[in-house]
Amino acid sequence: MDRQSLIGLNHYKNRDNIVVIESPTVQKANETIVEILQKYSDFKTAMFLSGGSTPKKLYEHFANEKKLKVGSVGQIDERFGVRAHKNSNEKMIEETGLLKYFESLNIRFYPMLEEDKEIEDTARDYDEALRFVLKYFPKSVGILGIGEDGHTAGIPSIPEISRKMIDDQSGIIDFYDAEKYGARITMNFHGLAMLDLIIILVLGQEKRETLSQMFKYSGTQEEIEKFPAKFFLKPEIALKTILITDQIV
């Protein structure tokens, strides 16, 4: 995949094989992602959306622009509970108007949560659905963020949990319940590795040190266990990753 053909006239850096676009504003960052996706995605593309506060304005931008074309949409991570509970990522995405836009185009949305299911069963069923989607659609793209503590997707910066996600290669969806993060279901490292294009959106002055720490990576598993975002520095992952940020990297 030629990432340079996707970024147009945007100036970029190459940091450890990750394409980095430094955006002057949040609005410009969102416009850049729209530009990339207009070139990359079509109705043969599976898109996966992460939660968190950072991508909310991006999803609103998608909904208002009405230019996004994909074949299906799934979730990267979710807070466990009843479907569309008030703190769920699905509820956040719905409130941006993006799900209504997808519905208008008959684009199927695959929610992580289902009614009356335990977390283990929910994770298992979504693992199965995700495998089907990735096999059915020729292309895939994921939109992710990075937390101040280095977590990404729903993968926490808790070594005993992230280590298990690395070591257990039988699934691409995992679940856990930790005091800091609560009960979560998330695409794990193996699931993220199956994506063809990874777009990371990192905004806010408070993320400058986070990005600095992320790029201090010598290639060990222990580093990823403590700071999951360093996973994107793995050579085979970096080559399909675009990082868009309003910070100087």
Image: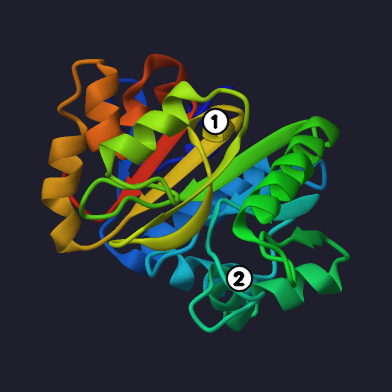
Task: Tell me if I can see residue 239 in this picture.
Answer: yes
Mark 2–mark 1 contact, CB under 8 Å? Answer: no
Q: Residue at x 74, y 78 (%)?
A: 100
Query: Looking at numbered disc 1 in the image, what kind of residue is underneath it?
Result: Ser
- The image position of residue 129, as x and y in percent, is 78, 45
Task: Tell me if I can see residue 70 in this picture.
Answer: no
Q: Residue at x 15, y 61 (%)?
A: 205
Specify whether 173 is left or right of 117: left
- SS at badge 1: helix
- The image position of residue 227, as x and y in percent, is 24, 38
For mark 1, what is the residue?
5
If you read the primary sequence from the N terminus, does the residue marked by circle 2 or circle 1 appear first?
A: 1
For mark 2, what is the residue?
90
Number of other residues with Cα within 10 Å of mark 2, as a class: few under 14, some 14 to 19, many 20 or more = many
- SS at badge 2: helix
- The image position of residue 168, as x and y in percent, is 51, 25
Q: Compared to 117, does 44 lie above or below?
A: above
- The image position of residue 67, as x and y in percent, is 69, 63
Query: Looking at numbered disc 2 in the image, what kind of residue is underneath it?
Result: Glu
The N terminus lies in quadrant: top right
